[in-house]
Amino acid sequence: MTVFSVWAPDVSRVRLRLASGPDQALERDPARAGWWTLDVPSAGPGTDYAFLLGDDDKALPDPRSAWQPAGVHGFSRVYDQSAYRWSDASWTGRQLPGSVLYELHVGTFTPEGTFDAAISRLDHLVSLGVDLVELLPVNAFNGEHNWGYDGVCWFAPQESYGGPDGLKRFVDACHQRGLGVVLDVVYNHFGPSGAYAPMFGPYLSEGPGNSWGSSVNLDGPLSGEVRSYIVDSVLAWLRDYHVDGLRLDAVHALVDRGAVHLLEDLAVAVDGLSAHLGRPLSLIAESDLNDPRLITPREGGGYGLTAQWDDDAHHALHTLLTGERQGYYADFGSPQTLSDVLTGAFFHAGTWSSFRRRVHGRPVDRGRIPGYRFVAYLQNHDQIGNRAIGDRLTATLSPGLLRVGATLLFTAPFTPMLFMGEEWGATTPWQFFTSHPEPELAAAVADGRRREFASHGWAEAEVPDPQDPETYLRSRLDWAELDKPDHADILAFYRRLIALRKSHPDLSDPRLDKIEVTHGDQWLVMHRGGVAVAANLAPKPQRITLPGFIRSVLLATETGTTVMRDGIQLPAESAVVVALA
């Protein structure tokens, strides 16, 4: 028996349309206000269905559909979550502290762009030392190619990637190899094409929108069901797909003026599910607020999320390595800013932001909040893809500075994250691409992209057309690069660096109040217990004084490092990790 249910509080009637047979009327559910339900014993798994609202004859997919085999505009299909035979019964989970994250986009990770094809590359991630694979959004969007942030079905994996069974096979394969899976999810807006949920009820706020369109209704009339819609989606990914964590996109765009913020609701619900499943589950926020309340435990008056992305860490590293100072990079770029981030997580912590033209952020309690709660990175999908031509650091930095940046990232007290291909110095760009079938929407997206970067000084002809299939194809990883000596050398270095981090407790110690940093003209030293990390950013050799006797060199990014009585002589653009007596 299949029970069809849908929330549609403001319509006079709801009908069910199956692929065959007459339309059938749903009845109001007396136990749940605004809900309609109908039992159809003959409609089992594999049945295609849609809803019709009021007197309109337009067939609409289920807002809670788990499967959209014909795309986001097509009929939904009944999916049996219990049918898949998992092989991860012994999986006990993967906690965030001490882990290394690896962000990848399913559609460009392999030439095939599917979950199954990605499975064939998992052993590469295992040998690299990765613990958690973070997937860019995979919930259903319109078209074949997309970053994923235009998703409209918050319970259904994208069919062109492999659909619900494909995602389960991927997670299962990760768990068999000891890899956890974090899934990027978007709840701050619906994509521009195929968003039918707002036709069923007040899913959208009547107030001001955000950068991507109308805000989701989290605190207005009938918002309770909208909040439940999000909570249920979160639990479904973690429970039904055995995912180990979620990355919550742009939580600063979740407008919630209620006494209990949605983020706290999510943390409470996920903690309950974690206790039931007996494995750790992580919630990681992307936030532009620099507000430690998000990751402060609920016992301390916070929201209780596991971690948050730390853009300040990226900006401090990026500007110091590249010399770029435009836009939001304006306040960064000195060894002092990196020192502030390494010891306090945020640079803007109740300080003036010239980009925002106001005071921004709040200090982190270094004695109470551990560094693992901050996910740090040299590169990610945003910081590459939102550049005009999607160029990676390999297009800007010397191999020496690439190694220096990686060394500082993996010896910092944060949770480090790589972006796919970074570990071998991939030269393929990662550009902004879409495949909207609607000509008007496609033109609007392309025009908006060109105007945005023209305002930053780029010639419009230089900005790739998101709708051009070549933009997508250019963004796919070139795995053949691994056979080239220069790329193989970078990969070997990343493997040594990650192994070093995991073999020395001082390097994975998340206590921010135990970090000491000294710096000078184009050099910086980070002290981590009995280990010191020295970096020379200058294009010439430098002598750096270190307190204490150097017992051994654990890792050097370049040959020619000379140990002295009171310090170390570093080659140009190099770094070293040493054990102190």
Image (spheres, grey):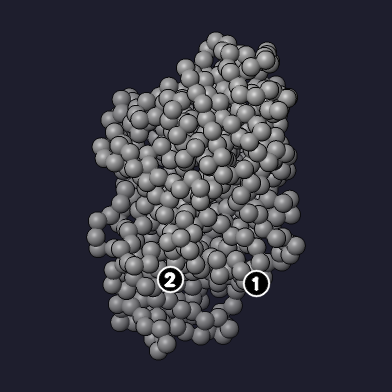
Name the foreground residue: 166 vs 172: 172
The answer to whether marks 1 and 2 mark residues whose Cβ atoms lie closer than 8 Å is no
User: Which residue matches tag 1?
Assistant: 82
Residue 127 shown left or right of residue 265 in the figure: right
Q: Position of residue 452 (x, y in %)?
A: 31, 35
In percent of width and height, residue 435 lies at: 44, 45
Give left or right: position of 168 versus 232: right
Where residue 228 is drawn, which disc sits there?
2
Q: Amino acid at mark 1?
A: Ser
**Residue 422's x, y, as percent?**
59, 33
Instruction: Mark 1 or mark 2: name the one nearer the start of the chain.
Output: 1
Q: Of residues 545 and 559, which is closer to you in this image?
A: 545
Looking at the rendered image, the quarter that the C terminus falls into is top right
The quadrant of the picture occupied by the N terminus is bottom right
- Hey, which residue is sitting farthest bottom in the picture? 30
Q: From where the camera sits, is residue 435 visible? A: no
**570 lies left or right of 361:** right
- Disc 2 marks a residue whose amino acid type is Ser
Query: Would residue 277 be seen by someone viewing this image from the given angle?
Result: yes
Where does residue 172 sit, x and y in percent of width and height? Answer: 69, 57
Label 1 crowd (10 A; few <14 / some 14-19 / many >=20)? few
| Secondary structure state at the residue bearing disc 2 | helix
